[in-house]
Structures are given as C-alpha cells and as structure tokens.
Amino acid sequence: MKKQTILVTGGAGFVGSVCVELLVAQGYQVIVLDNLQTGNRRAVHPKARLVRGSIGNARLLQRVLLAMLAHANTGHPGARELVTAFSSTT
Ligand SMILES: NC(=O)c1ccc[n+]([C@@H]2O[C@H](COP(=O)([O-])OP(=O)(O)OC[C@H]3O[C@@H](n4cnc5c(N)ncnc54)[C@H](O)[C@@H]3O)[C@@H](O)[C@H]2O)c1
C-alpha cells in the first residue's frame, strides 16, 4: 500500500522536527514547509523533504498541496495536468 504523505509546517523547528521524526518512524512520507526563520535545515529528518517558504505564501502552499495530491493519486488522470497547469502559470 502507498505510504501517506504528511505536510508538517515548522518541521525544522524544535516541536516540528520531533513530530517529523515520529511520523517518519511510523512510515509516513513527510514534507516540511519551513521558512527557516528560527528553524534549522539540519533539524529536518534526512528522509523528509524540505520546502523552504512561508505558510503565509498561499501560492507556494497551493503548489505543495497540489503536488501532494498528484503524488497521492498517481492513478488520477487529472492530477498531474493540474499541477503542470498550475506551475506553468506561476
Ligand atoms: N532544547 C530545548 O529544550 C528547546 C530547544 C528549542 C526550543 N525549546 C522550546 O520549544 C518552544 C519553541 O518550539 P517551537 O517548535 O514552537 O518553535 P521553533 O522556533 O523551534 O519552531 C518553529 C518553526 O516554524 C518555522 N516558522 C516560523 N514561521 C513560519 C512561517 N511563516 N512559515 C513556515 N515556517 C515558519 C520556524 O523557522 C521554525 O522552524 C519554546 O517553548 C522553547 O522554549 C526548547
């Protein structure tokens, strides 16, 4: 079965990095969205993917969520096109 992907905002910080560690240990794929304002990229679990940016950046957040949707629905014919279409307009 495909592993679920979870988005952890602030995952390079103190609390977030512990959450990421626990999620990875449970077999989840983790994407960290963090602007590194107080966090540190070295705190991000090596198995997690770091996207550097702010949760307040609606366009970035939309892109990340659409990419997660596409990844979760690889069998969904429209998902990849949706991401491509969105990316090509930004
Ligand atoms: N060793 C320790 O015991 C220790 C160490 C650090 C912190 N603390 C405690 O932990 C608490 C703080 O931990 P925390 O995890 O809440 O804070 P944190 O600052 O460690 O983590 C917050 C994370 O959110 C990120 N962030 C902030 N604004 C963002 C935005 N707009 N978009 C995306 N990412 C953003 C930061 O870069 C950071 O990685 C405090 O109580 C502190 O005293 C304890």
Image: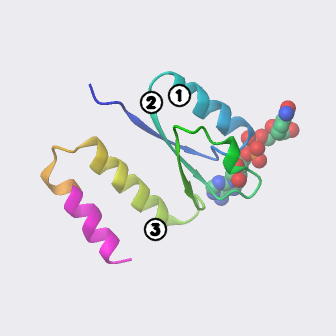
Residue under numbered circle 3: 59
Measured Cα–Cα span from mark 1 to mark 2: 6 Å
The residue at the point 15 percent across, 43 percent down is: 75
Q: Give the range drawn in magenta.
A: 80-90
Q: Where is residue 46 in the image (x, y as percent from the top left)?
A: 57, 39
Any atom of ligand 1 within 8 Å of the CB at mark 3?
no
Residue under numbered circle 1: 23
Measured Cα–Cα span from mark 1 to mark 3: 26 Å
Is 88 in the magenta?
yes
Q: Earlier in the sequence, mark 1 or mark 2?
A: 1
Q: Residue 66: which quarter of the image? A: bottom left
Q: What element carries label 2?
A: loop
| Left-right relation of 46 to 59 | right
Any atom of ligand 1 within 8 Å of the CB at mark 2?
no
| Left-right relation of 7 to 12 | left
Asked if disc 3 and disc 2 are in contact, CB closer than 8 Å, the reply is: no
Residue 28: mark: 2
Task: Name the front one of labels 1 and 3.
Answer: 1
Q: Which of marks 3 and 2 is nearer the N terminus?
A: 2
Q: Is mark 3 on a helix, strand or loop?
A: helix
Asked if disc 1 and disc 2 are in contact, CB closer than 8 Å, the reply is: yes
Q: Position of residue 32 (x, y in %)?
A: 55, 47
